[in-house]
Amino acid sequence: MAVTAGIQHEGKLTIRHEGREKIIRLDDIYYMESQNHNVVLCLKSGMLKYYGRIGDLEEELRGQFYRIHRGYLINLIYVKGYDRTGVRMENGDKLLVSRYKYHDFVQAYQAFRSGKI
């Protein structure tokens, strides 16, 4: 399954998949994970893996998404809870949060929840 880079437009991520554009609503994405030069989208409907860099999406999706670790870009809508070591997502996954990013994550999450972003 070949998929290429994504672009965000009005609450949607457009990716190239098998020669066609595939549109994914941002609200359908729990988080993105970096794995061996690929991006794995953890979606409500399952997983989608494509060749790409999570860093390319980080800036583009800033606000609703936050990078808690070099390997994870999470959708702040689906954060169920967190502590110093991890973030629990509504789908039940617990993701590692970098100790260097924890403080900034808490600030970003609180700003997001209060509607300041």
Image (spheres, rainbow, N blue to C red):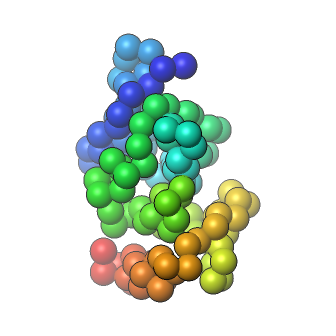
| Quadrant of the image containing the C terminus | bottom left
Tell me residue 92's x, y (percent).
73, 60
Tell me residue 2's x, y (percent).
48, 20
Q: Residue at x 65, y 82 (%)?
A: 83
Q: Residue at x 53, y 47 (%)?
A: 34
Residue 58 placement, left or right of 67:
left
Q: Is residue 102 above or below residue 50?
A: below
Return the residue nearer the eye: 8 or 27: 8
Q: Is residue 25 above or below residue 85?
A: above
- Residue 101 appearing in the image: yes
Tell me residue 37's x, y (percent).
49, 38
Residue 47 placement, left or right of 21:
right
Q: Is residue 8 above or below residue 80?
A: above
Q: Residue at x 49, y 79 (%)?
A: 100
Residue 60 placement, left or right of 55:
left
Return the residue nearer the eye: 89 or 53: 53
Q: Quadrant of residue 66?
A: bottom left
Return the residue nearer the eye: 83 or 10: 83
Tell me residue 22's x, y (percent).
41, 27
| Residue situated furthest top in the rendering | 19
Q: Quadrant of residue 91?
A: bottom right
Residue 21 placement, left or right of 34:
left
| Quadrant of the image containing the N terminus | top right
Q: Is residue 51 above or below residue 114?
A: above
Q: Residue at x 26, y 44 (%)?
A: 9
